[in-house]
Image: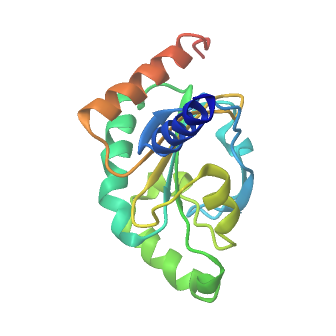
Amino acid sequence: MKFLYVCLSGVFLLVFSHSPTRASSSALTFLPMQGKTLSKASVTLPDYFNKRLTLVAFGFSKDSQNAMDTWLIPFKARYRDDARTFYMEIPMIGPGYSWFRGFIEKGMRKGIPTPAHAHVMSYYQSLAPYLNYYGFDKKSEPHILLVGPDSHILFQAQGAATASTLKDLFERCQQQLSRLPMP
């Protein structure tokens, strides 16, 4: 009987630990990465977040942008005037395309408004460490992280936002912001 209970517990954890949206209760911290923003600034993440509550949107395919925007647009609209928040878009392009970096980023600069260039950093190195560390399992969908001022992952989701998942995200944001002093 005990064996059956352990097996069923393991199945339960396996099924529910891969849910598309979940608040993080783990001690995961943001995995450092380096690159250049579209504004051509060399940055190291999470230092670049400057201890702000940061929404990070990872995109592994060009097709994920529309779903990514379902998170970014409401977040930016809600927290536009709050200096304690920040957002970052990270196109995860991989090393195979590094030869085309200039061409890719020139096109991105043309298609993205200039004020947003400081919020976009393309990543051209191995994707495996990030896929494995965060448990990202669908490259066709965006992966969203809410990173606290201490670099801990507070919320994780994949795919397009829904009214329910945005509510969860904003509740987590408000919990954190209530603990942070106003600038």
Q: Is residue 60 left or right of residue 94?
A: left
Q: In the picture shown, does residue 61 fall above or below 146?
A: below
Numbered marks: total: 0
- Provide residue 46's location: percent of width, then percent of height: 70, 44
> Going 62% across and 35% down the picture, which residue do you hit?
3
Residue 110: x percent and y percent? 40, 72
Q: Is residue 24 above or below residue 174?
A: below
- The answer to which of 153 and 19 lies nearer the viewer is 19
Closer to the camera, 26 or 168? 26
Q: In the orientation shown, which residue stands out farthest toward the left?
A: 163
* Name of the residue lying farthest toward the front: 1
Relative horizontal placement of residue 62, taking residue 180 as reference (left or right)? left
Is 137 located above or below residue 94 in the figure? above
Question: x, y percentage for residue 92?
Answer: 56, 67
In front here: 181 or 160? 160
Image position of 90 (left or right of 30):
left
* In the image: residue 79, left or right of residue 124: left
Q: How is the image coloured?
A: rainbow
Q: Quadrant for residue 38, please give it.
A: bottom right
Quarter of the picture containing the N terminus is: top right
Quadrant position of the C terminus in the picture: top right
Q: Nearer the viewer, residue 13 or 96?
A: 13
Name the residue at 39% across, 38% down: 76
Q: Please state the horizontal and vertical placement of residue 174, each as a whole percent of the image.
A: 46, 17
Residue sitting at 65 percent across and 32 percent down?
Answer: 26
Quadrant in which residue 62 is drawn:
bottom left
- Residue pictured at 51% horizontal, 36% vertical: 8
